[in-house]
Image (spheres, rainbow, N blue to C red):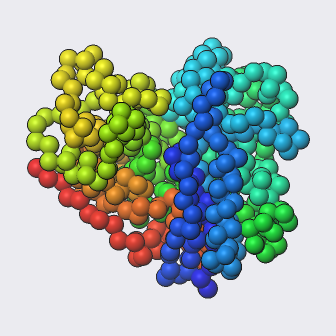
């Protein structure tokens, strides 16, 4: 087997990147050739993604990738979940809404009037999040849904623009709330909610070829006509979990970036009363695995606090802030990072103050104390969720793996280990891109085997940093 060169378009909720991957039996490399911001746009009708600007940046990144590595054989796209674009005869209708837009609240009311959350959970196994796709669909004007002939989640939309093929990749489709756990579209649920079934495309599994690049796209980025798009775990967490060098029967994972996705990997959905009460979700993984996890607000809280201080005229150097936070010795509040008040953009320190006031707790006083409070709160939420995931999923969690940007935050990793009483293994940072390129390379035949074989390659090529719990 020879080493394959592939390209990964990895779109996060705050930034995107294009990576060149080189993958073979003893090789796993991912090098960034383009990084770009992903900033939402507020208009008179709500908060939107700048989807055309994001696609343009991705195409520019692919052009650079093919300039650097002309031998690229495949492209894979992953992104955040739940958000979508509506199309009519191939044309995008409006700009996709951002999941943090407040319109989802009325969608929740509409859906739960027709089917309470407990009944929904029995059908789709999804954690209640007010921005799940089925709530967003319910918030759309009915005439707009009737006009649309196709709805594509963000990576599927990019795949369509690259190839002209409209498909719904399974791992991301599992976050819509309209997919049966481990199965296809839930026709009865779709009818009950009054949604137009015709807009949902055929499903495609990770590792399947979506299609060849459109000639105009291939010409624009300098790719050969034989280059195509391969479906990967297009939900970024699904790709990240592929690259967690773990034993699924003995570990929990935390994919930590804007969100903190904390869970375990299981063979079948867990739809128990305990899972429902704990608000755990069952999302599709690569190779039919199930990601039993809980969404936690993640580094979004810290990032928004930094933005608030900078808007007030206080430039922040994040490494220096975290160093100062580590030196804090006075007690700081541990607050509920999943409180809904922390979801929208805005002044995070003031919201932390309000939470503390409501709970009779003294708020932080300095920026270092705010940062330490956020880290301690995230670490506690991560530790609790990891233990709960193991209990609910029947996994003997003896190690916690943190991947993604959060794995660079040494204070967060150490405090998660301390609060969980378990070792934390941090890295790889670019787990999502690595999982993306691994599935492409396996489809091309440059590597073979199960997820465990792919994870063994990750472990052999990317050594994580170990954090032991302290007393």
Vertical relation: 85 (above or below) 224? above
Q: Position of residue 378 (x, y in %)?
A: 31, 40
Q: Residue furthest bottom?
A: 2
Residue 381 quadrant: top left
Is residue 175 among the parts visible in the rendering?
no
Residue that appears at 64% across and 56% down = 57
Q: Residue furthest front?
A: 313
Residue 420 placement, left or right of 308: left
* Residue located farthest toward the right when viewing the structure as drawn: 89
Residue 217 in the image: above or below residue 83:
below
Residue 313: x and y in percent read 35, 37
Residue 373 placement, left or right of 72: left
Of the pair 47 and 388, the residue shown nearer to us:
47
Q: Is residue 342 visible?
A: yes
Left or right: 440, with 13 as reference point:
right
Quadrant of residue 423 in the image? bottom left
Q: How many marks?
A: 0
Q: Please tell me which residue is depicted at 64% across the width and 50% down the height of the picture.
A: 54
Q: Looking at the image, which residue sits at the far top?
A: 113
Q: Residue at x 67, y 48 (%)?
A: 53
Between residue 45 and residue 258, name the one nearer to us. 45
Percent of width and height locating residue 412: 28, 49
Q: Residue 443's spot in the image, x, y percent?
A: 66, 70
Q: Quadrant of the N terminus?
A: bottom right
Q: Nearer the viewer, residue 39 or 109?
A: 39
x 71%, y 36%: residue: 95
Q: Quadrant of residue 218?
A: bottom right
Q: Is residue 402 left or right of residue 328?
A: right
């Amino acid at each position: 087997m020879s080493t394959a060169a592939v390209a990964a378009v990895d779109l996060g909720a705050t930034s995107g990147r294009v990576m060149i991957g080189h993958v073979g039996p003893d090789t796993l490399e991912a090098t960034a050739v383009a990084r770009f911001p992903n900033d939402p746009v507020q208009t008179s009708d709500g908060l939107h993604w700048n989807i055309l600007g994001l696609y343009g940046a991705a195409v520019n990144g692919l052009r650079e990738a093919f300039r650097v590595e002309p031998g690229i054989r495949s492209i894979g796209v992953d992104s955040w979940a739940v958000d979508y674009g509506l199309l009519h005869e191939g044309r995008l209708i409006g700009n996709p809404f951002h999941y943090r837009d407040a319109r989802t609240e009325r969608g929740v009311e509409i859906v739960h009037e027709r089917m309470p959350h407990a009944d929904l959970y029995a059908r789709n196994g999804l954690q209640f999040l007010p921005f799940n796709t089925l709530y967003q669909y319910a918030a759309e004007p009915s005439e707009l849904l009737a006009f649309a002939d196709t709805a594509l989640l963000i990576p599927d939309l990019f795949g369509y623009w690259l190839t002209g093929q409209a498909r719904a990749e399974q791992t991301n489709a599992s976050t819509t709330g309209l997919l049966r756990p481990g199965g296809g579209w839930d026709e009865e649920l779709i009818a009950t909610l009054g949604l137009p079934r015709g807009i949902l495309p055929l499903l495609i599994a990770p590792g399947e070829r979506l299609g060849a690049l459109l000639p105009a796209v291939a010409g624009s980025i300098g790719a050969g006509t034989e280059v195509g798009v391969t479906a990967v775990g297009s939900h970024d967490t699904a790709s990240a979990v592929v690259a967690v060098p773990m034993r699924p029967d003995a570990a929990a994972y935390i994919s930590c970036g804007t969100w903190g996705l904390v869970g375990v990997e299981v063979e079948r959905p867990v739809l128990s009363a305990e899972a429902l009460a704990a608000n755990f979700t069952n999302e599709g993984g690569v190779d039919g695995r199930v990601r039993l996890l809980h969404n936690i607000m993640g580094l979004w809280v810290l990032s928004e606090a930094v933005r608030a201080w900078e808007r007030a005229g206080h430039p922040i150097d994040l490494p220096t802030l975290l160093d100062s936070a580590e030196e804090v010795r006075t007690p700081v509040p541990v607050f509920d990072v999943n409180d809904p008040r922390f979801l929208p953009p805005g002044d995070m320190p003031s919201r932390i103050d309000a939470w503390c006031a409501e709970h009779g707790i003294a708020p932080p006083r300095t920026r270092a104390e705010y940062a330490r409070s956020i880290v301690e709160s995230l670490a506690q939420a991560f530790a609790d969720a990891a233990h709960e995931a193991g209990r609910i999923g029947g996994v003997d969690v003896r190690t916690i793996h943190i991947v993604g940007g959060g794995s660079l935050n040494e204070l967060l990793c150490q405090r998660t280990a301390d609060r969980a009483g378990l070792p934390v293994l941090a890295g790889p940072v670019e787990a999502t891109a690595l999982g993306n390129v691994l599935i492409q390379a396996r489809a091309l035949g440059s590597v073979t085997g199960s997820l465990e074989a792919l994870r063994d390659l990750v472990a052999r090529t990317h050594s994580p940093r170990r954090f032991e719990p302290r007393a």
